[in-house]
Image: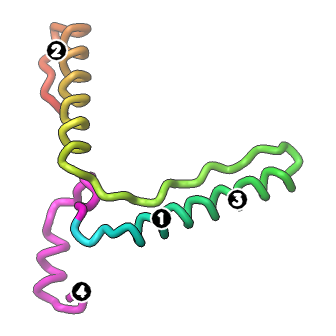
Amino acid sequence: MFDDPEMAARIASSEPSDDGFGLVGWTPERELLADTAEILMSLRSVLIAANSKDGKAPKFPRMPRPKTAVDRARAAAAKRKRSDLLAQLTPHHLHAPT
């Protein structure tokens, strides 16, 4: 599918999204694999800290997880709340929800 020129053009022209990905295809096995990868990265971080002079463990990124409708609704509510608070604190500016 990714080698199809028409599909590649559609993907390239679409807007990038911060929404992550949906639950389609997310299985308990994939959840366990993501957890295992995070545990391994955590162990790596601890080993680096134990062998470094300053003893600081590097941070590691979480493995991506699917975004549910509840996650998106919570994010939208938090964004509205931030926008409302900003509008109250700076009433002389026009604030559009971002």
Residue 33: horizontal and vertical position, in percent?
48, 69
Q: Give the range drawn in magenta.
A: 1-23
Residue 6 spot, x, y in % from top left: 11, 86
Q: How far apart are marks 1 and 3 (CA)?
A: 14 Å
Q: Name the residue located 25 percent from the left edge and 8 percent from the top edge.
A: 89
Q: Which of marks 4 and 2 is nearer the N terminus?
A: 4
Res 3 quadrant in image: bottom left
The Cα atoms of the two marked residues, 3 and 2, are separated by 48 Å
**Rendered image: mark on residue 2:** 4
Q: Name the residue under label 3.
A: 43
Query: Distance of mark 1 from mark 2, alpha carbons?
Result: 44 Å
Provide the major secondary structure of the magenta segment.
loop
Amino acid tagged 3:
Leu
In the picture, which quadrant includes the N terminus?
A: bottom left
Circle 4 packing at 10 Å, graded few (<14), some (14-19), many (20+), is: few
Q: Which amino acid does label 2 sit on?
A: His
Note whether 75 is above or below 43 in the view shown: above
Q: Is mark 2 on a helix, strand or loop?
A: loop
Q: Examine the structure image and report whether residue 13 is included in the region drawn in magenta.
A: yes
User: Can you identify the residue that label 1 sits on?
Assistant: 34
Q: Which of marks 3 and 2 is nearer the N terminus?
A: 3
